[in-house]
């Protein structure tokens, strides 16, 4: 899926989140992935940029950011 489609999917599923909050959430997850966190997706992540991977995880609902979405951990 394209980045634009993933972004639209996340924003559509979480109307309380705006694009700036999404950028912060992606950046935070990207930092975690860059620092050794394991991906929650069942795909080969060797050729995927960490920012794209973070956005994919958010779009699939595998990552939930407190305060930005209706579902909280």
Image: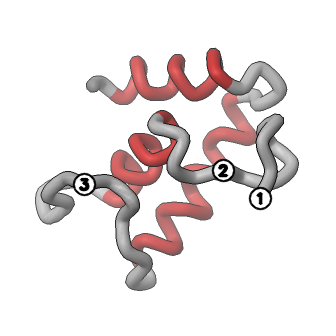
Whole-percent x, y for residue 69 in the image: 78, 38
5 shown above or below 28: above
Give the SS element for disc 1. loop
Cα separation between marks 1 and 2: 7 Å
Which of pointers 1 and 2 lies earlier in the amino acid sequence? 2
Which numbered marker is on residue 73? 1
Task: Decide: few, some or many residues near mark 3? Use Cα within 10 Å; few <14, some 14-19, many ≥20.
Answer: few
41 shown above or below 15: below
Residue 41: image quadrant is: bottom left
Cα separation between marks 3 and 2: 17 Å
Which of pointers 3 and 2 lies earlier in the amino acid sequence? 3
Q: Residue at x 80, y 42 (%)?
A: 68
Which numbered marker is on residue 64? 2
Cα separation between marks 1 and 3: 22 Å
Whole-percent x, y for residue 23 in the image: 62, 43
Task: Decide: few, some or many residues near mark 2? Use Cα within 10 Å; few <14, some 14-19, many ≥20.
Answer: some
Whole-percent x, y for residue 11 in the image: 64, 23
Residue that label 3 marks: 42
Task: Decide: few, some or many residues near mark 1? Use Cα within 10 Å; few <14, some 14-19, many ≥20.
Answer: few
């Amino acid at each position: 899926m394209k980045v634009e489609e993933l972004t639209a999917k996340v924003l559509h599923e979480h109307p309380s989140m705006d694009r700036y909050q999404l950028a912060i959430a992606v950046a935070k997850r990207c930092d975690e992935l860059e620092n050794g966190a394991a991906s929650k997706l069942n795909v080969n992540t060797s050729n995927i940029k960490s920012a794209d991977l973070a956005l994919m995880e958010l779009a699939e609902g595998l990552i939930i950011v407190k305060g930005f979405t209706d579902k909280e951990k």
